[in-house]
Amino acid sequence: MSGLVTVFGLAVTVGSYALSRAVARRYPSPLTTPVFFSTALILLVLVSSGVHVADYEPAKRILVFLLGPATVSLAVPLYKNRQTLLRHALPALLGLGVGSLVTLGAAVVLARVLGLPEVIRVSISIKSVTAPIAVELAPILQGNPSLTAAFVIATGMIGTMLGPWLMTVMGIHDPLSRGLALGTISHGQGTAQAVTEGELQGAAAGIAMSLAAVFTSCVAPFVVPILK
Amino acid sequence: MLIDVAVKTACALLAQLVGLLVLNHAGYAVASALHLPLPGNLVGMLLLLALLVTGALPLRWIEGSAALLTRHLAFFFIPITVGLIGFADLFLETGPAILMTLVLSAAAGICVVGLSAQMLGGRRRRRSP
């Protein structure tokens, strides 16, 4: 019986994801991004079929198991874009390092000023780290992985929607800098957006996404406990 | 003939996936052995990068599986966001404050990265002939 529910959970997840990709291709919008759309669809199916969210746990474990090798794969785009990184090492490293610290600090301080509880303040601090790494980093900082995943995905959407316009208003026209900013703040979703602006933007965003995750993972265990 | 190719491709992808799983586990082992406060999968990523850069592992040995996984990265954390349903009340209560925090911190970060990289890049370009 429980095996059947697991198969059902997996099938619903795969089906929702496939459907969401098809929908996103036809109607591209922040509301049809695969993660948002699939999550809503899965919850709808689980609730309407009477399967308790707790019974979805085994299916979840199987998929989260594959998140590890998926994260390891992120080394490949970094390796492929190493020439771009070496050519622009100083602006790239300094830009993404300072920017990662600013966005982390701003998030924790704002959350505090707005009176949000500690579990949110910690979970929101790493919202610019790419999701597969952020959900692993969250427990290290005593945050909640599900909350962090939501903040990460929301940040991906916010940066993709707001970023290109904001940078144009601020006079940031240099393609490398635009790519770096999108990748540092909005990780995978920002990188996908940067690719549409051009090849250099895409490469810079890919580098920024991976390196900002490394950088934030290294500094967050020291900075977040002080700020929270 | 066609099935032959499909089976071969599937086997290659599976072997590559096992390789990536081994690297992932090695990452967790290294992180705990050295007491690094880093996610093991991130250490695994750095291990793979080191293997590629040193040429110990040719890119084509893992490229197929790696491309497939990174293309569908979003799929693997959908189950985690499903877990959000447990926080529905919290979101209803604190939604506007959370949204404000996310928007302002993202905007600050984007401006700082963009402006600092553009300034540093510009200076560098002026110096070089």
Image (cartoon, rainbow, N blue to C red):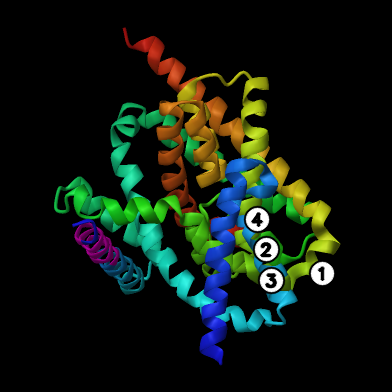
In the rendering, which numbered label is found on residue A45? 3
User: Label 2 sits on what residue type?
Assistant: Leu
Q: Residue furthest left?
A: B56
- The chain to which mark 2 is attached is A
Q: Which is more foreground, mark 3 or mark 1?
A: 3
Quadrant occupied by the C terminus of chain B: top left
Residue B111 sits above or below residue A50 on the image: above
Residue under disc 3 on the same chain as residue under disc 4: yes
Chain letter for mark 3: A
Residue at x 47%, y 70% (from the top left corner): A63
Of marks 3 and 4, which one's residue comes earlier in the chain?
4
The residue type indicated by label 4 comes to Phe
Q: Mark 4 — residue?
A: A36
Quarter of the rendering occupied by the N terminus of chain B: bottom left
Position in image of residue A34 (x %, y %) = 59, 53
Name which residue lies at 72% across and 68% down: A44
Using the numbered discs, state the Cα–Cα distance from disc 1 to disc 2 in whole angstroms: 19 Å
Q: Chain of mark 4?
A: A
